[in-house]
Amino acid sequence: MSLSIASSPPSLPIAITMGDPAGIGPEIIMKAYAKNPALVNTCFVVGDAKLLIKICQLLELDLKVQVISEADLPHVSSLPPRVIAVMPIPSSAALVQTGVIQALAGKIAGECIELATDLHLRVKIAAIVTAPLHKEALKMAGYPFPGHTEMLQSLCAQYAKQNIDDLPVRMMLMNDEIRTVLLSIHVSLRQAIEAVTIENIISTLEITHRSMSKILKRPPHIAVAGLNPHAGEGGLLGQEEIEIIQPAIEQAVKQGMNVTGPYPPDTIFMKARQLAYSAQPIDIVLALYHDQGLIPVKYLGVDSGVNVTLGLPIIRTSPDHGTAFDIAGTGKADPASLLEAIKVAQNLAHLALA
């Protein structure tokens, strides 16, 4: 079910954004370098070098930090083992308080995203792996986005001089057993239900089909979850499956997509997991709202989950967890999900060149 590990690194480096400096982002980055230096030898960090040095000292890691410029990007992979290349951002994290929601931390997280996205759009790097940010801190810093996905969408649309509505994107969460794409992301449950329309479902299926066909090198089998308990029970528990979801599936099939459903949402993820390595797998489950899709993926283990943004002109992955302010600065953060995100980013970079 997972993407195969690339046999050689991508020709361009991969940027790892530091995320919210008050959270666990800097710690998991340093631990990832220490745990698997061979994997990250083609990566560099966008962030505050002094903070990363401080984290390295606190964790007693045998690592060194080297500040680089854009001109150094082609030579990142030539750095000695256990040397971390860092491209600095304008703001300093010196005054950031660990574990506290604050505007400065949000500003730094935003600057990391802006710089990495600009480099990717100018084809200076192969992919972006984003360490977690805090949505409230981002808002306090003046960024009008509820998260990474929407900010990346806006930056890419601005670069292409497009209206943001002309660049629809979707979030895919994946691990070795299941993949799920979300119909809507960071909106209230009431708004998410209102977003269950024929148009939105078809648009999401098109984005998923197009993106995953490139990744899998074949059309994906997309299973659509129902909205209501038992997928509406033939209309007894709701009409959305009959009036909206089924017509959207039928139209997608007419367009040549391999789409089935709607399936009861309480069992389709188990079915997809059971068929993950079968001759006829369910490649992706389309979840109709945020928690419907994220709960099953995260239940299988946050440390193995990876977030991939579909629909962007760039490659972006991230760990499947947040800033974890409650353990920030304690040395307890686990870099496993970040390492998985780096692996997926490397493989997607290879597939993009295939």
Image (spheres, rainbow, N blue to C red):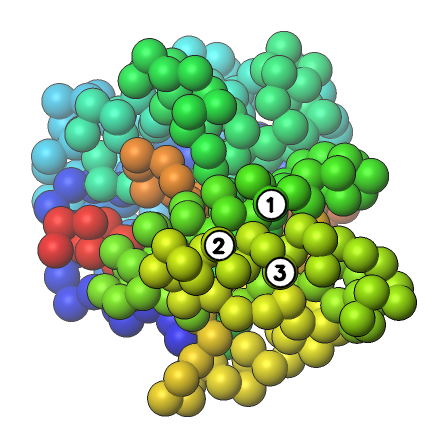
Residue 251 shows which numbered tag?
2
Quickly name the residue at label 3. Answer: 246
Amino acid bearing label 1: Ile
Who's the residue at 48% across and 23% down the image?
Answer: 165
Amino acid bearing label 3: Gln
Q: Please, is residue 143 above or below residue 205 in the view?
A: above
Residue 116 shows which numbered tag?
none
Q: Nearer the viewer, residue 215 or 249?
A: 249
Whether label 2 touches label 1, CB < 8 Å: yes
State whether residue 111 appears in this view: yes
Who's the residue at 72% across and 26% down the image?
Answer: 136
Q: What element carries label 1?
A: helix
Q: Is mark 2 on a helix, strand or loop?
A: helix
CA neighbours of label 2 inside 10 A, class few (<14), some (14 to 19), many (20+): some
| Quadrant where the C terminus is found in the figure | bottom left
What x and y, as percent, mark residue 167? Answer: 41, 28
Amino acid bearing label 2: Gln
Who's the residue at 22% across and 41% down the image?
Answer: 126
Q: What element carries label 3?
A: helix
